[in-house]
Image (tube, coloured by chain):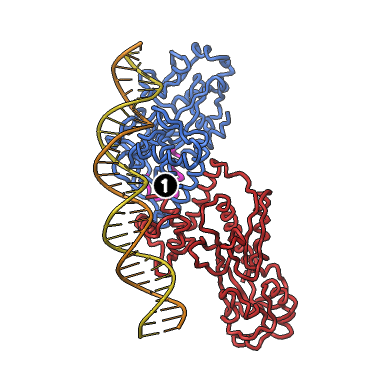
Chain colours: A red, B blue, C yellow, D orange
DNA sequence: CCTTATCCTTGCATTTTTGCAAAATGATCC
DNA sequence: GGATCATTTTGCAAAAATGCAAGGATAAGG
């Protein structure tokens, strides 16, 4: 068995397609496919569901993923010790992110990273639009949908959940909606409909809501509106621990899930960016897991 | 960087030579050398001291070894989950070992293994001679010197230490020797000189001792002689916790170190034997470390 | 319902890696 | 002190892996 096939496996699992993994591995998709086929043969199990939509992990693949990531961490530490990569990072890194992520996740994650790398300047770019990496607006970008360009490397960061919520005061006065259709007449808080910059953010249409009497381009403003008793809003589960006034509404009927993607240039490899990417990925995953557990559904 | 080079690194580190690693990796020594060279290039550090005596780890190599072993463990778990290797082992495994190892290490180690694999029959062959694997006397053999045959796979298990010791009673009566030359006239316990089956066991010659008034082919008998106040004996540090009557003599002047090697056939690969080998290696290493710490010099 | 776009797969020329055999290198034994 | 031994290293042919380009399959959009 060839250990290197696991490196290929890992990159493919994260990129969720051969074509997307190409940039990370700097290998032809055909080669990646053949190596995964060999790995599956060796393992005696199917690791991916292959389709024209990409490669998705099977259950067996998910089990392997956990261990492959441990191995990666160990190997990273090992080589880190040798190449002197234990050295502290420095210089500016600018990260673009949607404001939910920028407000409720990145501060803690970046603080911890900055703590261990005092010479690193972390700049968080929170804009109500998609950050344009090609124009060098940032070094790394977090987005809610996967960029299509071939010149960008996109890897899956983490899934996260959203819930419909309102302040307990508001619910006491107006009563909680009993079913999804009730939402049509309810006082909804959301994005300004004609300024939604990514289809993935159009939660309310998905719930059948047409009118949005209170709106903002910023999810944190929306959250403040909800805390102040302005109505019902779709908010990130990971933001809920910061808003104790809020209570979930129709938690079973509203089960929204989205994915954060981490993107950077496909240009020449940059060891410093590699390391920051790694730290960011681990940090955000852990923070989402922590906060979602706190906000336990 | 190629993860598979780390698999090669690991095997070579354990075998301590390209030629010996050949059997484990089923690769030509030339290939192994080239892959290690590539790994060193990637790591930017020299990992082995190469000589006609074999490959020995440098300090950098030792640091990497730790992490590579962690990675190996993670990968092993990962593939174990898939290939259903989590299943319990069964059938007989016969292990040949010198009696010091057979008496003071293997019982605990084997008990723990048997605990987790109730259908496994572990047979410990303790003989006052080198176990002959070629004649199928055992499936695995532990030895104090490295077998030379090409048809055997030998890997380094662990170093261990030996000390000169005598019972406190005996020391009170006869007095402790003050220096190495004193040993010539002292009452020594050791192997029967013309029945020493491995040059590595000839500790007493190394100390300049010529006459052995109390002798046995068995180190555990020698230890009992020493406990009973029969004189001075060279005993394994890992046996000392079991013999509280004994006290070290000239601990600074007598610093003997030996190595256990684990050997098996170079024939076709056997997954079951692979797994037992792994368990045994980890178990013995841990047990030696534990006992030597207990007997703290 | 057809078109389009996006992805995975297959066939073939090229590059890389590997294995074998021979040469070189040091330590050890007599 | 010189031959001998087991080891690593180098040169070259064979095998394997890789990249490229064309073919094929599936979902979304007009």
Q: Residue at x 53, y 15 (%)?
A: B180
Task: Check disc 1: other Cα within 10 Å, few if <14, some if 14-19, many if 20+.
Answer: some
User: Which corner quadrant of the image does residue B153 belong to?
Assistant: top left
- Quadrant for residue A131, please give it: bottom right
Residue range corresponding to the magenta coloring: B106-121
Instruction: Using the image, determine if residue C6 lies above or below residue B278.
Output: below
Residue A230, quarter of the rendered image:
bottom right
Give the position of the C terminus of chain B as an image quadrant.
top right
Residue B264 placement (x, y as % from top left): 34, 38
Q: Position of residue C1 (x, y in %)?
A: 35, 85
Residue D28 lies, in percent from the top left, at: 46, 78
Left or right for D21, reference A244: left
Whether residue A37 sits left or right of residue A108 in the image: it is: left
Could you tell me which secondary element the residue under label 1 belongs to? Answer: helix
Nearer the observer, A260 or B232? A260
Q: Is residue B10 visible?
A: no
Main SS, magenta region, reads helix
Is residue A5 something that shows in the picture? yes
Q: Nearer the viewer, residue B280 or C22?
A: C22
Chain bearing tag 1 is B
Mark 1 lies on residue: B4
Q: Was residue B180 drawn as part of the magenta stretch in this picture? A: no
Residue A61 lies, with reference to residue B284, above or below; the image says below
Q: Nearer the viewer, residue D24 or B267?
A: D24
- Residue at 72% from the left image edge and 76% from the top image edge: A225
> Is residue B17 positioned above or below B114 on the image?
above
- Please tell me whether residue B116 belongs to the stretch shown in magenta: yes
Estimate the x, y position of residue B39 in percent, counting from the top left.
45, 41
């Amino acid at each position: 068995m060839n250990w290197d096939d696991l490196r290929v496996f890992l990159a493919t699992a994260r990129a969720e397609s051969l074509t997307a993994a190409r940039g990370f591995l700097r290998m032809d998709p055909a080669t990646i496919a053949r190596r995964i086929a060999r790995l599956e043969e060796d393992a005696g199990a199917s690791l991916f569901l292959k389709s024209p939509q990409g490669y998705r992990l099977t259950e067996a693949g998910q089990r392997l993923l956990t261990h492959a990531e441990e191995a990666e961490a160990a190997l990273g530490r090992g080589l880190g010790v040798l190449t002197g990569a234990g050295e502290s990072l420095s210089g500016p890194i600018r990260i673009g992110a949607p404001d939910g992520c920028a407000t409720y996740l990145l501060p803690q994650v970046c603080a911890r990273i900055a703590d261990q790398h005092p010479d690193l300047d972390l700049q968080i770019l929170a804009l109500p639009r998609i950050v344009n990496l090609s124009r060098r607006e940032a070094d790394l970008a977090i987005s809610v949908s996967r960029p299509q360009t071939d010149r960008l490397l996109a890897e899956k960061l983490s899934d996260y959940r959203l819930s419909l919520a309102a302040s307990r005061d508001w619910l006491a006065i107006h009563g909680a909606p009993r079913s999804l259709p009730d939402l049509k007449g309810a006082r909804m808080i959301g994005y300004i409909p004609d300024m939604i910059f990514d289809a993935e953010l159009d939660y309310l249409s998905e719930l059948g809501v047409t009118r949005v009497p209170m709106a903002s381009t910023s999810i944190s403003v929306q959250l403040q509106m909800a805390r102040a008793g302005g109505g019902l809003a779709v908010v990130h589960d990971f933001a809920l621990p910061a808003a104790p006034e809020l209570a979930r509404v129709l938690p079973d009927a509203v089960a929204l899930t989205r994915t954060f993607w981490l993107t950077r240039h496909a240009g020449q490899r940059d060891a410093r960016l590699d390391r920051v990417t790694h730290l960011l990925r681990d940090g955000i995953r852990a923070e989402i897991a922590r906060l979602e557990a706190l906000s336990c559904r």
